[in-house]
Amino acid sequence: MSTAEAPVLEATLDGGFGVYVHWPFCQSKCPYCDFNSHVRHGAVDQPRYARALVRELETLAARTADRSPRSVFFGGGTPSLMEPATVAAVLGAIDRTLGLPGNAEITLEANPSSVEQARFQGFAAAGINRVSLGVQSLYDAELVRLGRRHDAATARAALAFARRTFSRVSADLIYARPGQTLEAWSAELTEMLDLAGDHLSLYQLTIEPGTRFFDLARAGKLVVPQDDLAADLFELTDALTRQAGFARYEVSNHARPGGEARHNLVYWRGGRYLGIGPGAHGRLAQGDRRVATATIHNPEAWLAAVEANGHGLEVDEPLERADIGAETLLMGLRLAEGIDCDTYDRRAGAPLDAQRIRSLAADGLLEQRGRRIVIPDSARLLTNAVVRELLP
Ligand SMILES: C[S@@+](CC[C@H](N)C(=O)[O-])C[C@H]1O[C@@H](n2cnc3c(N)ncnc32)[C@H](O)[C@@H]1O
Ligand code: SF4
């Protein structure tokens, strides 16, 4: 059988399978954030949302061939605002419908406020074994500027408490902030590396359309570091994390050996994931197709749809092989391990353009390692441009 005729499903059975659960509520909206997050002043009816999440899970689980997810990820929004009973209800339903292996990685994104720390033990009892803590900065003035509700002392305490409570802990920091110098970032990251568990997500601040920072930037009232400084900050980040025993395995993600986020690897390696909750995306193995799903963003509209129809899907479509190939490039080339050209061929049904690979390699933008292609560290900040060049 030629690669063009190979069934799509066969070509997507690698990469693993995980479940994503979106909790869309936050206590306030941070001025840089364009995630699907909403502030509700009245109490959120958690038992009702829990029932809807379970119902949508049951609907989608009945459609997909995958079982035994290797990971579950509660993302947001602010999932640490969930009651532990809500988390437990969802995990119980995942186990009932799909079978949840004892060694699955089960992550919850948490904000470091004291209210949320009070729930950590309840989350651990519900089955959470990994927490991803949104620290963002270790300086009080920066936290105020980022619109955060916690101060640096609370973040340090939350990290220490999380490390005592969960077997694995990650923390997020945002750098390349307005006015940030190399010296200031060096001091902040060095302190973070002392406090860190097995994983760090270090994001350069991006100014997203529709956010308050976007309006400020457009009005000239907020200026982020430009190319040269951003590149120096990126290199400094690499050097300091490496010295501390962390490897950058993805553009913004660093782990001690074995500490990589297994759930996110499912996305980057082109695996399948079942996504439930408002605004969740999924990639399901259905028959011999890879199906893209996305649910309604607005929480109340999603809730009403699930209660009426058993799901809140607004996108539900099989992907063409060319789309699967494009996703493989977009996601896989973010990884330090890059992508395997044979896997790409099987998924896309056609090989990559060898001439373009050679020319990118000659320009130092791509490395060929046997059958793998990898973006070298020196070209990391050009990842999107390299991917665009390779897209058929
Ligand atoms: C879903 S969000 C946040 C989870 C949690 N609600 C919190 O705020 O801690 C995941 C992470 O994306 C990062 N992030 C969000 N918007 C960003 C932006 N505009 N630029 C860079 N990083 C961003 C933050 O580090 C954040 O912790
Ligand atoms: S950064 Fe986190 S807490 Fe802030 S609005 Fe976005 S999701 Fe909510």
Image (tube, rainbow, N blue to C red):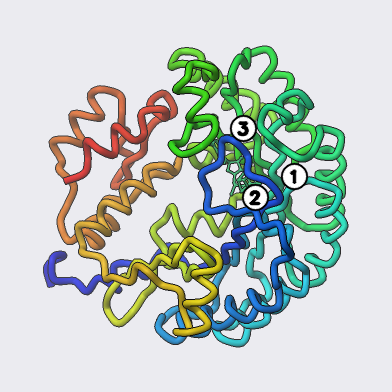
Describe the element under mark 3 as helix, strand or loop: strand
Q: Residues within 10 Å of mark 3 (few under 14, many from 20)?
A: some
Q: Residues within 10 Å of mark 1 (few under 14, many from 20)?
A: many
| Residue found at x 44% / y 43% | 335
| Residue placed most toward the observer, 288 or 207 | 207
Residue 124 point in image, percent of width and height: 80, 65
Residue under pointer 2: 259
Residue 346 point in image, percent of width and height: 23, 62
The disc placed on residue 197 is 1
| Residue 268 located left or right of residue 146 | left
| Residue found at x 86% / y 63% | 121
Q: Is mark 3 within 8 Å of ligand 1?
A: yes
The residue under label 1 is which amino acid type?
Gly
The residue under label 2 is which amino acid type?
Gly
Look at the numbered discs 1 and 2 and tell me whether their residues touch, using CB distance below 8 Å. Answer: yes
The residue under label 3 is which amino acid type?
Ile
| Residue placed most toward the observer, 381 or 111 | 111
Q: Earlier in the sequence, mark 3 or mark 1?
A: 3
| Residue found at x 56% / y 69% | 70
| Residue 113 located left or right of residue 263 | right
| Residue 129 located left or right of residue 66 | right
| Residue 289 located left or right of residue 29 | left
Q: Quadrant of residue 239?
A: top right
| Residue placed most toward the observer, 5 or 297 | 297
